[in-house]
Image: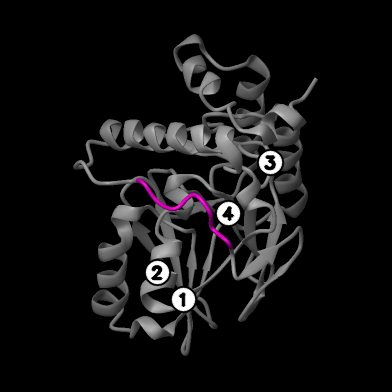
Amino acid sequence: MHFKEFTIHHFKGYVQNNYIVEYKDKILIIDGASRPDVKPLYKFITRTLNSPIEKVKLFAVTHCHPDHAGAAGIFRKKYNIQVAAPYDIDEWYHGFRGTLQHWSDTLQSRFMARKLKSKHRVLYYNKRINPDFKLYDRSVLPFFDDWESIHAPGHTLHNLSFYNKKHGILYISDTIIDSRGKFLPPVPVLFPELMKQTLLKIKIIKPKFILLAHGTEPFYKYNEKMIDDTIRIINSGPPPYIRFFYFISKFTNVYRKNREK
């Protein structure tokens, strides 16, 4: 997608879609990618885009899961690229129960990789993100004041979306999944009422374009049907064959303290 100020490049990662927002003098990476994406993403930036890695100023991370945070810390350590993430992102995997959740989420990403027929790669990563910049609802992204974060709970409690108001571009991470042309909620939706509020917030924003972390297309023109379809499925509850994944997503103390009554 080409705009006056920047070009958005689609990078098909190990499990997820990532988006590289290339300006004349800087690059923003949305989202934090998976650990197996480190080398391919580096090659994409330095070879495909023919840009020095120093041009990357920020990783904008939406939440703590392996396919959204697994590469960001490695890039920071290797190339001194700063990371922006939800202010409370490290609470999700805190303590013993958080460690169990980290292992569980990593295994779930392994399951997704096998489903996508991706080659076996190490997915484990440091569970503590320790972001350089802590993001809240409506925070302006550091170095990129044309983008802001929007609190989007439901999948986890700390999920964010990223919004460029001028061009109506909204990256919604895992809020909606496109599975073979059918719009679905992610697995799991731990906070269904909050997720529905997040989806209704998208209706209020009315973006022109939606970017999905998991979808068959790199860019989608927004339409309300994708919101309505997802809300309807949330209301119907998870089908029996995926309830196991809900069960193993509830170790974290954050869920236990904030679960909906």
Residue 250 placement, left or right of 218: right
The first of marks 3 and 2 along the sequence is 2
Callout 2: helix, strand or loop?
Answer: helix
Residue 159 visible to an observer of this rendering? no
Q: CA distance from mark 4 to mark 2?
A: 16 Å
* Labels 2 & 1 near each other (Cβ < 8 A): yes
Q: Amino acid at mark 4?
A: Thr
**Image point (58%, 54%), residue name:** 62
Query: Are there few (<14), some (14-19), or many (20+) residues within 10 Å of tag 3?
Result: many
Residue beneath disc 3:
157
Q: Which residue is mark 4?
A: 62
**Mark 1 lies on residue:** 81
Measure the alpha-carbon separation of dots 3 and 2: 25 Å
Q: Which residues are magenta?
A: 124-130
C-alpha gap between disc 1 and disc 3 = 26 Å
Quote the CA–CA distance across marks 1 and 4: 16 Å
Q: Given this view, does label 4 or label 2 mark the residue nearer the observer?
A: 2
Density class for disc 1 (Cα within 10 Å; few <14, some 14-19, many ≥20) is some
Q: How is the image coloured?
A: one colour
Q: Secondary structure at mark 4?
A: loop
Q: Earlier in the sequence, mark 2 or mark 1?
A: 2
In the image, residue 136 above or below residue 215: below
Q: Position of residue 80 (x, y in %)?
A: 44, 78
Quick check: 23 above or below 41?
below
Residue appearing at x 36%, y 74% in the figure: 78
Instruction: Name the N-terminal-most of marks 1 and 4.
Output: 4
